[in-house]
Image (cartoon, rainbow, N blue to C red):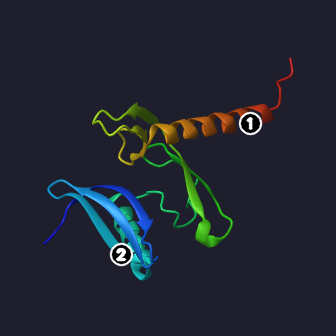
């Protein structure tokens, strides 16, 4: 019997650290707790990443370097991966657009959607505190980069 998961709200380790517990919500089932043995979590992530990559080509999965610096069909240009070692490699893209709004469903989240209304859109939901922390970090980083720019000669 299939269970349809509509949202994943959190994940943590069990007290004995033998299982990963994922809190989910299903349309017809309500809140569900899924438990995965720690030995199979990497396999689960790998198969989910593979399926998601097939459903959404170009999804940022940290799987490897960008093959080209040319913009894709949506206009989002890949950026060269940054890595400390192969296992922690992260692939970056420059989105064509984004939108930010308050979740009107009553969950109290701030919604952040990259490449809004394009084929490769991706969304993230933040608590208000996390959204403020993200906004502050973006402002500090942007200010630091702008301060590094050379002053134009008059």
Residue placed most toward the observer, 129 or 91: 129
Query: Is 66 on the left or on the right of 123, as rendered?
Result: right
Reply above or below: 110 against 4. above
Reply above or below: 17 against 10. below
Residue placed most toward the observer, 26 or 54: 26
Residue at position x 82%, y 31% in the image? 150
Q: Which element carries disc 1, helix, strand or loop? A: helix
Please, which residue is most extreme toward the right here? Answer: 153
| Residue named by callout 1 | 144
Please, which residue is most extreme toward the top here? Answer: 154
The residue carrying pointer 2 sits among few (fewer than 14), some (14 to 19) or many (20 or more) residues within 10 Å by Cα, namely: some
Please give the count of numbered marks on the rendered protein.
2
The N terminus, quarter of image: bottom left
Please, which residue is most extreme toward the front here? Answer: 15
Q: Which element carries disc 2, helix, strand or loop? A: strand
Q: Position of residue 67 (x, y in %)?
A: 55, 61
Residue at position x 25%, y 56% in the image? 25
Reply above or below: 42 against 66. below
| Residue named by callout 2 | 36
| Quadrant in the picture for residue 115 | top left
Residue at position x 82%, y 24% in the image? 152
| Quadrant in the picture for residue 101 | top left
Residue placed most toward the observer, 62 or 23: 23
Query: Is 142 on the left or on the right of 9, as rendered?
Result: right
Residue at position x 48%, y 62% in the image? 61
Marked residue nearer the N-terminal end (1 or 2): 2
Q: Position of residue 97 (x, y in %)?
A: 47, 36
The residue carrying pointer 1 sits among few (fewer than 14), some (14 to 19) or many (20 or more) residues within 10 Å by Cα, namely: few
Reply above or below: 111 against 120. above
Q: Position of residue 54 (x, y in %)?
A: 35, 64
- Look at discs 1 and 2 and give the one toward the viewer: 2
Residue 26, numbered label: none
């Amino acid at each position: 019997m299939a269970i349809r998961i509509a949202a994943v709200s959190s994940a943590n380790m069990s007290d004995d650290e033998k299982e990963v517990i994922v809190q989910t919500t299903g349309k017809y089932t309500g809140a569900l707790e899924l438990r995965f043995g720690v030995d199979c979590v990497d396999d689960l992530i790998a198969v989910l990443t593979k399926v998601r990559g097939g459903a959404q080509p170009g999804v940022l999965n940290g799987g490897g370097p960008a093959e080209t610096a040319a913009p894709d069909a949506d206009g989002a240009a890949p950026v060269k991966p940054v890595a400390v070692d192969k296992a922690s490699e992260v692939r970056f893209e420059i989105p064509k657009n984004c939108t930010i709004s308050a979740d009107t469903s009553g969950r109290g989240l701030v919604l952040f959607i990259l490449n809004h209304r394009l084929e490769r859109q991706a969304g993230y939901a933040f608590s208000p505190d996390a959204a403020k922390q993200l906004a502050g970090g973006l402002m500090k980083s942007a200010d630091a980069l702008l301060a590094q720019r050379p002053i134009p000669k008059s």
